[in-house]
Image: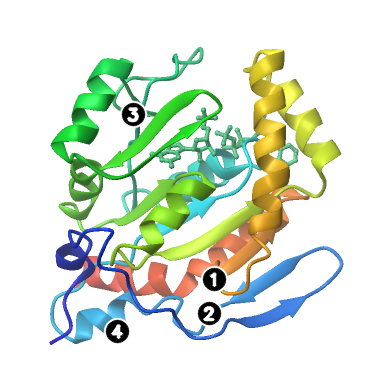
Amino acid sequence: MIRSWRQIFRVTAADAAPAGPAPFVTSSVAQVYKRNPEVGCGQALAKGGMAGPRPVVLTGPSGAGKSTLLKMLMREYEGLFGFSVSHTTRKPRPGEVHGKDYHFVTLEDMKKGVERGDFIEHAVFSGNMYGTSTAAVQAVQANNQICILDIDMQGVKSIKKTRLNPIYISIHPPSVQILEKRLRDRNTESEESLQKRLNAAIEDLEISKEPGLFDAIIVNDDLEEAYTKLKGILGEEIKQTQSGKNS
Ligand SMILES: Nc1ncnc2c1ncn2[C@@H]1O[C@H](COP(=O)(O)OP(=O)(O)OP(=O)(O)O)[C@@H](O)[C@H]1O
Ligand SMILES: Nc1nc2c(ncn2[C@@H]2O[C@H](COP(=O)(O)O)[C@@H](O)[C@H]2O)c(=O)[nH]1
C-alpha cells in the first residue's frame, strides 16, 4: 500500500528512500533546468489514497534568492503554500519575526531539541545551528498546504535519507561574483559570515552537479524569469492542490 508523505516522513534517516529515476535534462546558456518525471506526482500518491501535497525543498547558496522567490510564491498563491519555520541559533536580522521567519533559540535549547529527536534534519551553517522540526512540517500539513523547506545542502542530504519525498529545487546565482554583490548589498552579514557563506556556496555549487540530486536547478539571474520557471516546475502540484482545496 502506498503511504502518504505525511506518514512516511516520520521514518528515520536510517530508512533511506530508493534512488529516483534519472532526471530529464534541458539546458541553455542562461539556465540549467533538470526535470524529474516524478515532479508533481504528489497527487498521484493522493489517488492511491492518502497523500497530501508533496513538499518542496528550496536550496542553494546563501544569497541566491530562495527567500525572495518563496515569498513571491506565498504572496501570489495565498494559503496554498506553507513555510516550514526552522529553528536557528543565529540572531534575528532587523525585521525578522520569531515564529514566522525562524524560531530563534539558544544553542542549549537547540541541542536539547536535537537530543529529544524534535528535528527531521539539522545542520551547522556559517557557525550557527539550523534545523527543521517535525512540528514545523506538521503545522503546514495540518492546513493541507504545500510545505516549503528552505534549507542548506547538508539538510538536502539528510532529507534524502528520509521518506519525506519532496520536490528538490536548487536556486543558483548567475555567478559567485554576483552572489557576493547581492549578499554585500543585502547588508546582513559580517565580513566573517559573508566569507563563510561564499566558501559554502562554492562547495555547494560543486556538489549540486551530482546527477539526480535535484529535480530542477534554476539560475536566478532575472528575478521574474526565475520566478516563472519556479511556477512552471511546481505547476502541476499547484493545480492539484488548488483543485483539492476547491472540491
Ligand atoms: N534576481 C535577482 N536580482 C537581483 N537581486 C536579487 C535577485 N534575487 C534576489 N535578489 C536579492 O539578493 C539578496 C539575497 O536574496 P535572498 O535573501 O532571497 O537570498 P537567500 O537565498 O534566501 O539567502 P539566505 O540563504 O542567506 O537566506 C536579497 O537582497 C534579494 O533582494
Ligand atoms: N539544514 C538546514 N538549513 C537551513 C534551515 N533553515 C535555513 N537553512 C539554511 O541556512 C542558510 C542560512 O540561512 P540565513 O537565514 O541565516 O541566511 C541558508 O542556506 C538556509 O537555506 C534548516 O532548518 N535546516
- At x 20%, y 30%, the residue is 113
Q: Quadrant of the C terminus?
A: bottom left
Dot placed on the residue nearer the N-terminal end, 3 or 2: 2
The span from disc 2 to disc 4 (Cα, nearest Å) is 15 Å
Pointers 1 and 2 in contact (C-beta within 8 Å): yes
The disc at residue 100 is 3
The disc at residue 36 is 2
Dot placed on the residue nearer the N-terminal end, 3 or 4: 4
Dot placed on the residue nearer the N-terminal end, 1 or 2: 2
Residue 44: image x %, image y %?
Answer: 29, 84
- Residue type marked 4: Ala
Does 5 sit left or right of 226 as displayed?
left
> Mark 3: few, some, or many residues within 10 Å (few <14, many ≥20)?
few
- Residue type marked 1: Asp
The span from disc 3 to disc 4 (Cα, nearest Å) is 31 Å
Disc 2 beta carbon < 8 A from ligand 2?
no
Under tag 3, what secondary structure? loop
The span from disc 1 to disc 2 (Cα, nearest Å) is 5 Å
Write down the residue under mark 1: 215
